[in-house]
Image (cartoon, rainbow, N blue to C red):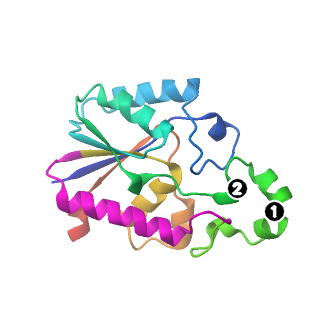
Amino acid sequence: MKNIFVIRHGETDFNKEGRYLGRADEPLNVAGMSQAKKLAKKTSDLGIEIIYCSPLKRAIETAELIKINHGCEVVIDKYFIERSMGLYEGLTKEEAKNKYPDLYAKNITRILNGAPPHGETINEVIKRVFEGLDKINSQNKFSNILISTHGFIVKVINKYFNPKISDQEFFDFSLVNAEILKYNFDDLKK
């Protein structure tokens, strides 16, 4: 049985300010560090054997705190980096709407094959994350695996384990900072 525990990193200043974070390499803020420490305590009895982690600071800082309780390896894995938001990165929704009104009116961040210029489409992210999960499933010998990642990537992981969800359910699904979900690869065979 392969349990997959998925966590969203602790809070950053950009999260607090409601900014598109994307690939901006923001560290955890004071609240985020506190959240990550609480999450580390919450995960201490899960028997985590390996942690896969986005290469961004906020996910690494969260993973490193969890690692302390498990003494396991943290593998930096590009499959689980946050969706690139291109021109929107660092902007609030209001700033994006004012700076790029035509683009914002298209609701470009919710179009499966669309993205802000220099950003990733949803379908590109789905392909990337699904490849990473398939790789973990086929090559990993561990029973308790943790992935330290980001809000949008958590949506994609949820879709992987729940392939029949609607587009609306995909967009509505969310995980707050420093929370955890559990999935199991064996459930995919049913």
Q: Quadrant of the N terminus?
A: bottom left
Q: Position of residue 14 (x, y in %)?
A: 65, 39
Disc 2 on helix, strand or loop?
helix
Q: Amino acid at mark 1?
A: Tyr
Q: Position of residue 75 (x, y in %)?
A: 30, 43
Q: Is residue 188 left or right of residue 59?
A: left
Crowd band around label 2 with a 10 angstrom C-alpha radius: few (<14), some (14–19), many (20+)? many
Q: Quadrant of the C terminus?
A: bottom left
Q: Position of residue 136 (x, y in %)?
A: 25, 57
**In the image, is residue 142 part of the stretch drawn in magenta?**
yes
Crowd band around label 1 with a 10 angstrom C-alpha radius: few (<14), some (14–19), many (20+)? some
Which residue shows up at 41% across the image and 65% down it? 128
Residue on which the image places disc 2: 88
Per the rendered image, the range of residues in magenta is: 116-144
**CB contact under 8 Å: marks 1 and 2:** yes
Disc 1 on helix, strand or loop?
loop
Q: Is residue 51 above or below residue 100?
A: above
Nearer-the-camera pick, 120 or 1: 120
Q: Position of residue 4 (x, y in %)?
A: 28, 50
Residue on which the image places disc 1: 100
The quarter of the picture where residue 66 lies is: top left
Dot placed on the residue nearer the N-terminal end, 1 or 2: 2
